[in-house]
Amino acid sequence: DCGWSSDVCSSDLYVPKKEAGIGRVIVDLLRGEVNGHLAQLPVVYPRIDDLSKRLYPGCWFFETDFADHFYHFGVREEDRPYLGLQRPFGKGVCRYARLPMGGATSPHHCSRLTYAWQDELRERPPFKGNYHLNLPGRPGYRPDRPFMQKLNDAGEPSADDAIYVDDVIGLAPSYESGLAALKELMLFAADRGFVLKYKKIRSPAQYDRSFN
C-alpha cells in the first residue's frame, strides 16, 4: 500500500535480483524498532533427513518453489501503520500489506500458514494416504520400500511431499503418478492464490540411489 502515512517508518534498501528488471526491497525492521516489540515465536523447519527416510529405489521426485512466499499472507489492517517504509524510488511512504521480509514473526506465520495449506493438499487424491513404519521384523516389511512409507487405502505407495521454507519436493511411485501429483499441486496452489516459480518447476525424475 503506497501513499499512506505511518506511525513507524523503517529504512530500506533495494537489491537487484538475477532476473533482469526485478529487485528485492529489504527493510530494516530492527533499526525501525518494530522487531523489538514483537514476540519471539518459534520456527521449526524440516530436516533433509526427514525426506531421505521416505526415499526408495525407483521412486520419482519432482520439485518447485513459491515466488516471494512471505507476500502470499496478508497483514491485519490495524498492524499496517507499524510497517511503514520510505518508497524505494520517489517520495512518499508505503506500508506493508503482506508479511514483510525482515519481520521477526514473519517466518513463524509463513511456515504455520504454509503447513496448514500442506495439510489441505495431503487430502487431495494423489497425496492422500497414511504413514507407516517399514522396519525389519515388522509385519509386511518390504526391503524395497522406505523406512517411513505413505500408503493409500489400497496399501500401495501414494504421492508424498515435503516443504522446506519455500521449496516443495514431491515423491511418487511412478512417472505418471508423479506428473499427476505435480499437476494437482500446481492447480491447488493457484486455487489458493499461491504463485509458483514456473521456471524452477522440475518434472518427475527417477531416484536411483540404493540404500547400501
Image (cartoon, grey):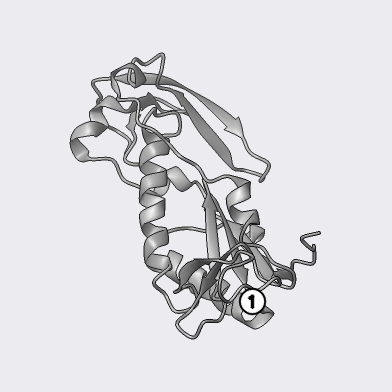
Residue 129 seen:
yes
Instruction: Tell me the residue at 42%/75% (across/down).
Output: 124
Task: Specify whether 71 is left or right of 63.
Answer: left
Along the line of sight, the residue nearer the viewer: 128 or 73: 128
Q: Amino acid at mark 1?
A: Pro
Image quadrant occupied by the C terminus: bottom right
Question: Percent from the top left, x then y, of residue 111?
Answer: 42, 45
Outermost residue, left direction?
A: 78
Along the line of sight, the residue nearer the viewer: 200 or 167: 167
In this rendering, is residue 183 above or below 147? below
Along the line of sight, the residue nearer the viewer: 135 or 17: 135
Question: Percent from the top left, x then y, of residue 130?
Answer: 45, 70
Name the image quarter holding residue 34. Answer: top left
In this rendering, is residue 171 above or below 93? below
Mark 1 neighbour density, 10 Å: few (under 14) some (14–19) many (20 or more): some
Outermost residue, front direction?
A: 137
Image quadrant occupied by the N terminus: top left
Instruction: Tell me the residue at 35%/21% (across/down).
Output: 35
Question: Percent from the top left, x then y, of residue 93?
Answer: 34, 27
Q: Secondary structure at mark 1?
A: loop
Instruction: Tell me the residue at 50%/42% (across/down).
Output: 45
Instruction: Tell me the residue at 58%/44% (across/down).
Output: 47
The total of numbered circles placed on residues is 1
Task: Specify whether 41 is left or right of 204.
Answer: left
In this rendering, is residue 86 above or below 74? above
In this rendering, is residue 201 above or below 85? below
* Residue under numbered circle 1: 173
Question: Percent from the top left, x then y, of residue 171?
Answer: 61, 67
Residue 99 seen:
no
